[in-house]
Image (cartoon, rainbow, N blue to C red):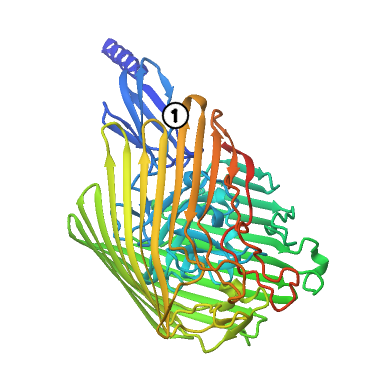
Amino acid sequence: MSKIFIYTALFLSAFTFSQNTIKGKVTANNEVLAYANIYIKELNKGVETNEKGLYEFENIPNGSYTITASYIGFKSEKKKITLENNSDLTINFTLQEDSNTLDDVVISGTLKPVSRMETPVPVEVYTTAFLKKNPTSNIFEALQNVNGVRPQLNCNICNTGDIHINGLEGPYTMVTIDGMPIVSALSTVYGLSGIPNSLIDRVEVVKGPASSLYGSEAVGGLINIITKKPTTAPLFSADIFSTSWLETNVDLGFKSNIGKKVTTLVGINYYNYNQPIDNNNDNFTDVTLQERISIFNKWNFERKNNKEFTIAGRVFYEDRWGGEMQWNKSYRGGSEVYGESIYTKRVELLSKYQLPTTEDMYLSLSVTAHDQNSVYGNTIYLANQKIAFGQYTWDKKLENHNLLLGAAFRYQYYNDNTPATVSAEQTKIYSVFLQDEIKLAEKHHLLLGARYDYNNNHGNIFTPRIAYKWNPTENDVFRINAGTGFRIVNLFTEDHAALTGSRDVVITEDLKPETSYNINLNYLKKIRFENGVFLGFETSAWYTYFNNQIIPDYDTNPNQIIYSNLNGYAQTLGISGNIDLVTPFGLKAIVGFTIMEPKNVQNGVISTPVLTEKYSTNWAITYDIPKWFLSIDYTGNLYGPMRLPILGDLDPRPEYSPIWSLQNIQFTYKKFRSFELYGGVKNILNWTPNKGTPYLIAGAEDPFGENFDATYMYAPNQGIRGFLGIRYTIF
């Protein structure tokens, strides 16, 4: 009996020693990938990576196997391995992003995670890999290569701006961070430059009204900036670059674990440009001088059943000025030397908490405070804004119905020293919304949505929405979306032209809220060829109609900006398309175009809106040379003519801008595991708007006079410049 026991023990021992272990890490874009799938084909066995991107297989028998790592939005990677007795293999994977995949998980269209192929609402996704093709110091500039999206500079002196979508002015675009509407009104103009690129996971763009889910301001479209998860971010990351104009940008990221259940992520962005340059010889700075710092901190708390709980905060300070070359802070607010100086202080807090129930319910909260101290020559503009937002959502599945029920409350306090604000304005908006996505059949989905808002200043607001999706094949998607929009106007917080220059501001009536109606048709096609080439094609056609639109009138009186509700209507119709190409030999290309026809009809007279191009193209072309560890990125855009705000018939400046283009090239060296070295040239054509124009700023010789105007601005004044940078990452 004892011999049998000994032989059995020896056999089990031998069997145990013949078992092997496979472990490793999965990364992409110098970041770990949590919950990536690792699969051994021959054993039909799989695991997921943990929050640190690590995986492990135990007790794997001897033999030869194929192990595959996969993750949505990235190309799968396979490796052949052979295991012998007592093997302990470490197999790491570095997944390459499939920037043209159509299966991304998106949130912005329906307020919940869903496959991009499955959602009835077309959503465009741009990851950090896309944003790095042309490195910028802020998200405002980074969006310049997104088709149909144009960062618009509104002032030749202080270079503040907003983001246009499909030809609509910046105030019609809602910008959210992790779905929270914290970039709006006053910060629409001054807050976009302070979002650290280092903490952005991806940017989702919805073109067309999203008011039924996101409320007022989401009339023209939505840009949702989604930040990284603390659990999957690297331990340390740094991205530092400088240009030949002596612009310096520093992005730093730190992650640490506090105990076993808390992870915190800190991001710091610092930008400095302090070199006055006047290449167009008008005695005014070509580019605004800036110094800013932004600190972002996000906390993730591990809970039972993987329930979500995050808290994030950001503090931001910026000091920018532009003006006559001899200006310094001793002249601030005076009448001797003209300058525009803006001090911005901003604090944000946002949180998302999944309720401890069997149902899928969330509470989201955000609080922001924005303080601005600015002068425009001898005009002082002091403004303070506070916003509190809370939202409850319940995601419920019932057979063929996927319901989303929500309620929200928004409080906004605003006060400034302009004559238009007699006393502090307080706005309260109570909202409820319901969305039902109905699976009519395997290939047919219908989405119905409605939102009801009660505004203490404007009463009842109702914004319905309908969307339909048809998948004739797994590679084709047809979508149609229709909805209404509603926007409450914050005039001085949105239109910088009302504060700069010598034009008088005239408000002819008690301005009413704007309403809009929109319909959008979308077709998406993906093709995978046998030789490994991928081709994606997406096209959209849209029509937007406005009532009560508020448009600054520069034409009636050249010395005035007249604000009133449009006595007629405004409309924009257009078509756009994106073509994505990925080849097995290292070439990738994303090319987009937009053609549109905007017009305003006032008292039966048709006019073209100012600062609205009729066509544009964008491209981002990448070529990888693995044997040289080199990637080459060629990015650019081209814009058609747009009408400009001139000072009457005697103004010698052209009424329409020329066709213009900004193009860039970048080289990235990737031989080292933790380092990336990159450099290149921005604006390689050295194009600036002063070419062919006698001057850009009217009355520059007498900036405190009646003819001074700095709103003739449609493109950056910054010419060709080189840049050089380094990225360093520790997992």
Task: Tell which of 704 and 677 is nearer to you.
Answer: 704
Q: Residue extending furthest top?
A: 3
Determine whether 573 is above or below 228 in the image: below
- Mark 1, Cα crowd under 10 Å, few <14 / some 14-19 / many 20+, is some
- 561 displayed left or right of 405: right
Task: Tell which of 269 and 274 is nearer to you.
Answer: 274
- 319 displayed left or right of 151: right
Q: Is residue 264 visible?
A: no
Q: Is residue 663 visible?
A: yes
Residue 426 figure quarter: bottom right
Quadrant showing the N terminus: top left
- Residue at 31%, 22% (x, y): give it: 65
- Residue at 39%, 64% (x, y): give it: 596
Residue highlighted by disc 1: 92
From the top left corner, tell me how far across and down residue 306 is, in percent. Answer: 40, 51
**Amino acid type, mark 1:** Asn
Determine whether 386 is above or below 94 in the image: below
Label tally: 1
SS at mark 1 in the image: loop
